[in-house]
Image: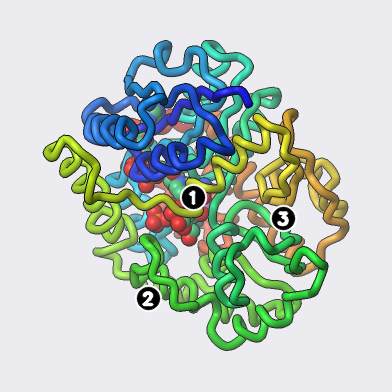
Amino acid sequence: MKKQKILIAGGGSTYTPGIVAMLADNIDRFPIEEIKLYDDLAERQEPIGAACEILLREKNSDIKFSYTTDPEEAFTNIDFCMAHIRVGLYAMREKDEKIPLKYGVVGQETCGPGGIAYGMRSIPGVLEILDYMEKYSPNAWMLNYSNPAAIVAEATRRLRPNSKIINICDMPIAIENIFADILGLESRKELTVRYYGLNHFGWWTSVTDKSGHDLLPQLQRFVAKDGYAFETEDFQHKHPSWKATFKKAKDIYALDPTTLPNTYLKYYLYPDYEVANSNPDFTRANEVMETREKEVFEIAHKIIDNGTAEGTSFHAGAHATFIIDLACAIAFNTKERMLLIVPNNGAIDNFDSEAMVEIPCLVGNDGPEPLSIGSIPTFQKGLMEQQVAVEKLVVEAYIEESYQKLWQAITLSKTVPSASVAKTILDDLIEANKTFWPQLK
Ligand SMILES: NC(=O)c1ccc[n+]([C@@H]2O[C@H](COP(=O)([O-])OP(=O)(O)OC[C@H]3O[C@@H](n4cnc5c(N)ncnc54)[C@H](O)[C@@H]3O)[C@@H](O)[C@H]2O)c1
Ligand SMILES: O=P(O)(O)OC[C@H]1O[C@H](O[C@H]2[C@H](O)[C@@H](O)[C@@H](O)O[C@@H]2CO)[C@H](O)[C@@H](O)[C@@H]1O
Ligand SMILES: [Mn+2]
């Protein structure tokens, strides 16, 4: 098996050490020659890079490792770029969440006006790293987690239609891990699922075991009572906000008891509840800064101070496994069935061919081969048409530098009650994002 050369873009991300650790632990199935980190902010990346260097030396000294802020050094001679950048860092996420909440509207990282604001920042950031990759390693693949994945995916479909980029999300994976827990199975990999939707906006229509036994009814009985609130206490989902999210799946499910929902639908279906249960002075960005960000950087500094990673451990869960599975499928043509964000292109036959949808695909050397979904019901189709229009309008607004289209996008979001509220929020977001967004005309 050919040894792979990996670049992690957004080297200073809280998720980087988990992916590095997981890569080192998976060399039997995914052999590695080199791991590099790239970030545009040296001081953010420095402690993560220095800690990963020590960790990797102790785990597997054969893997070459470096970190840099120089694009040419980073992007030259790589097979995969695993990307997870956050343009504007948590400081801007906090504004994305708090500005809409000031006006009684959902304040969320990827949904509603906050997600739209983040999309306008992410588009140029992701295009920049994609262009670096194509310039310095034209045969490489970008596996992109950078959010908001729906808007980023639409932007790359429009602006870089021939690029080797696959946009991905780990939310369905995290929920399928809960399915496995509910069913008493060892792993979500014992399940075969059918799922369709947009990113952070989808439904499972089938969950079976490998012999084809229908497991959906058992899961539905659980979800009707408890949502996805299984007693998981993992790194991420121990926080109160995630626990509340998993419980709320019960109410999302009630709207369509024939399927199982993605948790993110709560922001569109119960926005009033979400706002009433949010603290406008302390949002998820604050919770993350006080927990995951603090913990990851404390571990990094401890490793550096001790000169060893012994006695420490970075969290490396489903997020890291999923991106490595995807790289494996492409590098070694495994044809693994995975949920990916891809052009619809007829897969959902009664839905816009040019929409980016999240559906099962078989993945091999040439990338994803989407599976056919057939027709979807009126409820889901109506919701998805509205949401995909929002995502397309954001990308058009970015391309045309259009105030009008961004106002339309925010107005059309199901999380926003009126055009006047949309305009007030937009004007605040423009002020907050003036160093990131194009100047809107
Ligand atoms: N798709 C998914 O399901 C999924 C899951 C988890 C995380 N994410 C996304 O992964 C990203 C990272 O999340 P995090 O919480 O670790 O954020 P973080 O702020 O800890 O890390 C992001 C890093 O990106 C760097 N960065 C920003 N702009 C850059 C650019 N133009 N070029 C290079 N580097 C740049 C920052 O300096 C920072 O070090 C976010 O976009 C988050 O939403 C997505
Ligand atoms: O609020 P955050 O920053 O903790 O998480 C927001 C992300 O939530 C989903 O992702 C993952 C998470 O990143 C991962 O660590 C895993 O363990 O669980 C989560 C799923 O619950 C979502 O898919 C991402 O798009 C968000 O950025
Ligand atoms: Mn996601």
Image-quadrant location for residue 242:
bottom left
In the image, the residue with mark 1 has its CB under 8 Å from the nearest atom of ligand 2: yes
Residue picked out by circle 1: 319
Q: Where residue 258 sits in the image (x, y, percent)?
A: 75, 77
Is any atom of residue 194 visible in this view?
Answer: yes
**In the image, is 433 to the left or to the right of 348?**
left
Q: Amino acid at mark 3?
A: Glu
- Mark 1 touching mark 3, by CB under 8 A? no
Q: Residue at x 41, y 25 (%)?
A: 63
- Mark 2 touching mark 1, by CB under 8 A? no
User: What's the mark number on residue 32?
Assistant: none
Residue picked out by circle 3: 385
Using the image as rendered, state which of residue 247 and residue 217 is in the foreground.
217
Q: Earlier in the sequence, mark 3 or mark 2?
A: 2
- As displayed, is residue 246 above or below residue 306? below
Marks 3 and 2, how far apart in space?
28 Å
**From the viewer's perspective, is the residue at label 2 or at label 1 nearer?**
1
Residue picked out by circle 2: 277
Q: Amino acid at mark 2?
A: Asn
